[in-house]
Image (tube, rainbow, N blue to C red):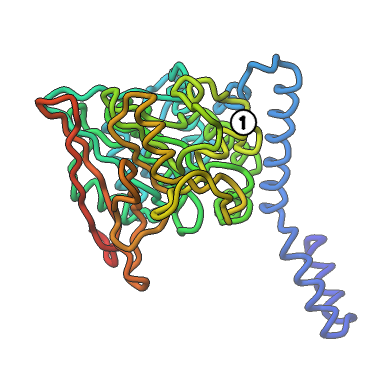
Amino acid sequence: MLKMDVFNSLTDKILPENCKKSLASVQEKFKPEQYKKSLSSITFQNKVALRRSLKSAHVTLGECIDCEKDLDPLPANYTGPTLAPGDSLSVDFVRQLSSWFSCNATLPLKTLYRLLQLAEKSLRLHPNSVQEISLSPDQCVHVCGDVHGQFKDLLNIFHLKGDPSDDNMYLFNGDIVDRGPASLQCIVLLLAWHAASPRSVHINRGNHEAINMNMKDGFHRELMEKYNDNILFDFFQEIFSWLPVATLVSDKVLILHGGLSSIPGLELDDIRRIPRGNSFQPDDSDLLCDLLWSDPMQIGMGIRESSRGGGVLFGSDVTATFLHNNSLQCLVRSHSEIKEGCACSHPGCYTVFSAPSRSRNIYGGVLTLHPTDTQHLRMEGFVFQEVTQKH
């Protein structure tokens, strides 16, 4: 008999029933394969922590991860998308990823970390916190609001408005994660799209691309249930900090997640100067916090305190002044759940929300911007319902 078999035989004869159950519970927690997995995870985290401590402050977390040496090989029965060392992200890979996530909730860690390293590298190419899109006559950009982990609805947006391309662009205006059941799939797919085709898919940061919200509203819990890997959560926080805060379309429409700030005389250059990287959080900047958390008032002027605990309420006069000072046509934001999916919040300020709910009679919205013969862009609204079946 093996030692463990002898031990089990003796305890089965000697111990009372309640003690047997307690022992069985302990043994279940410390199965050899689970122990090896836990030890491997701890070793990986220690390796990354040691490398970070030995490198300069400018080295990112992603640069401290060696996918080949640190992570287990792909499972023998894995049939999903793969990334070999030196591979770049392609549109074909992203299409495979989309199909894989339609039936599977996770990727192997080796593939996931490689993908995130490439996504971070792509995001770091943005020169500052305001990314710019210029539309030619045959192009458009679909502005999508909060997605909040609703993967089927994200796929439905692509189904309804067409695949991303240089002429059919998308901008996802923050709050990709939290609340919904598939935040991982949503954010990974969008990061993959951006890295594979950076002119086709753009992403702004939302107030939920932040550590405090992720700890409270589900993204951290989802990652731990799927991977039990704290390094992965930290890596996402670093990637979120590289996301642009705002997008300027054809020098006329500014798109950001929350709204305007109480800071007087706000200019686009103030937003451009907001720091990025190093897991920079909204709490680290009053301006960043305002831009991600503020809401427009439908009635009322000036600046008022917000009940959200972050940002402010701003009136149409504040919007008008900001648009005039920065030679802008209008402001597009998200952040607020609205039944119509998209609407005018007050003159010059529009809201789009893209996480529909049939049970609460809330539609998802998309705002599409088209160039015109004039200096202004044409805005077109589109609404859709929550997906209840797989496409």
Q: Nearer the viewer, residue 246 or 91?
A: 246
Amino acid under disc 1:
Phe
What residue appears at the point 53 percent right and 42 percent down from the top-left corner? Answer: 209
Is residue 149 at least partly visible in the picture?
no
Location of residue 266 with respect to 332 vertically, above or below: above
Write down the residue under mark 1.
280
What residue appears at the point 78 percent right and 60 percent down from the top-left corner? Answer: 2
Q: For mark 1, give the secondary structure.
A: loop
What residue appears at the point 28 percent right and 60 percent down from the top-left corner? Answer: 340
The reply, left or right, for residue 108 in relation to residue 6 is left
The reply, left or right, for residue 335 in relation to residue 303 is left
Is residue 247 at least partly visible in the picture?
yes
How many numbered marks are there?
A: 1
Location of residue 385 with respect to 141 vertically, above or below: below
On the image, the x and y values in percent for residue 49 come to: 73, 29
Which quadrant does the C terminus fall into? bottom left
User: Among all residues in the image, which is located at the extreme right?
Assistant: 14
Location of residue 358 with respect to 119 vertically, above or below: below
Q: Nearer the viewer, residue 311 or 19?
A: 311
User: Among all residues in the image, which is located at the extreme bottom?
Assistant: 17
Which quadrant does the N terminus fall into? bottom right
Q: Nearer the viewer, residue 2 or 53?
A: 53
